[in-house]
Image: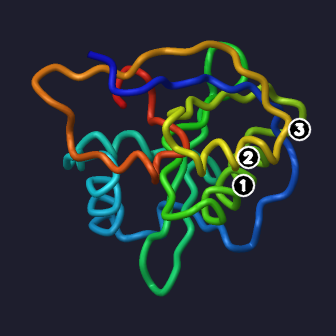
Amino acid sequence: MPAYRNVRWRTVGGGERPDSVVELSSVPVEQLVAFDAAVFGSTRERFLRAWIDRPAGQALACMRGGGLAGYGVVRPCHAGAKIGPLFADDRDVAEALLTGLLAAAGQGTEVFIDMPDTNARAAELRSRRAMEPSFETARMYLNGRPPEDVRKVFGVTTLEFG
């Protein structure tokens, strides 16, 4: 049974990276693993270590009060670039990260991000930018739904991995 829909949105890269955004590599991996597990619903340290091993500027974080408040990754894909994950405590953190990731993608680069349609804050973030829907998928689970926090998912890691 479907849990919710994901919509792939298309936009264009460029702009300036906000000062509030830092390299994800500067965050202690234990903080990243704990933050990610609280959002994703399970621990995936081995996956994260490989997934975030990116050139400078392509894996970004926002810190607040000494702790991780959000992180995101942008990577090249067949056409343009793909953002995911984009996990954040709130829309302001997600906005800063999205701005930094679009800057990292490069001026004029076509950029895609898959957002869960059940996250109203992601819809709010999206409405502030020129984004067009590309296609939709349904998120489905076998043997029950994991304890993910969809309110903090502004961009899924990848449709294949959640």
Marks 2 and 3, Cα distance to the nearest angstrom? 9 Å
Left or right: residue 115 compared with residue 37: right
Q: Position of residue 15 (x, y in %)?
A: 87, 50
Residue contact between numbered discs 1 and 2, judged by CB atoms under 8 Å: yes
Nearer to me, 77 or 66: 66
Task: Identify the amino acid type marked 1.
Answer: Gly
Q: Which residue is mark 3?
A: 107
| Residue drawn at the location 54% of the way across and 32% of the way down | 117
Asked which quadrant contains residue 112, the reply is: top right
| Residue drawn at the location 62% of the way across and 29% of the way down | 82
Asked which quadrant contains residue 14, the reply is: top right
Q: Position of residue 51 (x, y in %)?
A: 40, 40
Task: Identify the amino acid type marked 2.
Answer: Ala
Going from N to C along the chain, the mark reached first, 3 or 1, is: 1
> Which label was assigned to residue 100?
1
Marks 1 and 2, Cα distance to the nearest angstrom? 6 Å
Q: Which residue is mark 2?
A: 104
Left or right: residue 101 compared with residue 59: right
